[in-house]
Image: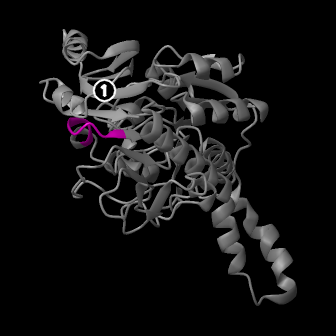
Amino acid sequence: MHKILCLNKISPIGTDRLGDNYEFSTEMQNPEGILVRSAAMHDMELPAELLGIARAGAGVNNIPLPKCSENGIVVFNTPGANANAVKELVLAALFMTSRKIIPAIDWAKTLKGNGKEVSKMVEKGKGAFAGPEIMGKKLGVIGLGAIGVLVANAAHRLGMQVCGYDPFLSVDAAWHLSSSVDKAASLDDIFTKCDYITVHVPLNDSTRGLIGADALAKMKNGVRILNFSRGELVDTAAILPMLENGKVAAYATDFPDDALIGVENVLAIPHLGASTPESEDNCAVMAVDQLKDYIENGNITNSVNFPAISMPRSEGHTRICIAHRNVPNTIGAFTAVCGEENINIENMLSKSRGDWAYTIVDASGEIAPDIAEKLQALDPVVRARVIY
């Protein structure tokens, strides 16, 4: 029986897919797998039995990736599962930052009790909430992953001129991106030419503060900025004075901090990007399927710390899965151990990603019960296991 620890509530649409050979709970001891959404794991002691962690969502900032890699724990995410939900909220923010809809509604509430005078007061006061249409305006999309592509295509269909920037554009994303979306040669093309800018990149050392004082200085007066990826991508201290002097006409963020709440022309949304039942179901299904395939077959799909790798199972073959450092002569060391143990290698596949690699060996014949221990004793290896 495989044990799964759920650190957050996971949609039953997903957990139902685990099947009879699995048990899961929020208190599971010695789990082989963990399903998580937002729970912080950095101070968590990782069980020795733990093989994989599946995040029901895209961001993995709550998971200690280096620690997991060192222990041969594969971390999965679910890119694209919540993409439509985020796209819809970004489109809503495009309208709300343009037309001052929220302040106007709040103002209208203050008219309660004025009876027949309300109509006159509305006509007299509505001018304070005028704002531009988005049709014909230029939108810059930074990051053309699953969400960025959907936003770019939808904005184009709404009549916007769309310019996208992504130096790491994948082949799959390129296939789905409308040919009408212009390709920016640099971030400066986005910063200097766009009326609206939306950010859809992961948070890391190279993107933290991506929109800071230097970037803001290059932007058009009255630019509107949308951040539905991670709060730290935009430098709060840098954008606040730009909001005050009008350089930035509006800022919408799904990650409000204390300094932004209540600030005029800031649309502070409480992290609602993926808060739809459809998104939660999609993320749960993808997370469970990926974790289950890894536990049962050793295949890796959508990992953030190890390479994507999969190989069909053949009846009668035993599978050996090895997580290891990406260093020379490692494969030779594996085959040498297999030779010493009289293991006949039927199929082998190995892939790397940065400092880490992963190898699958399908073997026939009698497999010594201590083969995993012997492979794991090799210096580059951080985890070896046998799947019968």
Q: Is 87 left or right of 355, judged from the image as shown?
A: right
At label 1, counting other C-alpha atoms closer than 10 Å, the crowd grade (few under 14, some 14-19, many 20 or more) is: some
Q: Give how far across and how far down residue 131 sits, in percent.
A: 69, 50
Is residue 384 one of those drawn in magenta? Answer: no
Q: Where 300 falls versus 328 (above or below)? A: below
Q: Which colour scheme is used?
A: one colour
In front of the other: 251 or 366: 366
Q: Is 148 left or right of 362, judged from the image as shown?
A: right
Residue at 69% from the left image edge and 60% from the top image edge: 101
Residue at 53% from the left image edge and 25% from the top image edge: 315
In front of the other: 259 or 85: 85
Please, what secondary structure does the residue beneath circle 1 have?
Answer: loop
Residue type for callout 1: Ile
Q: What stretch is highlighted in magenta?
A: 68-74
Q: Give how far across and how far down residue 10 sits, in percent.
A: 53, 60
Q: Which residue lies furthest to the front in this view?
A: 366
Residue bearing mark 1: 367
Q: Give how far across and how far down residue 336 sits, in percent.
A: 20, 11
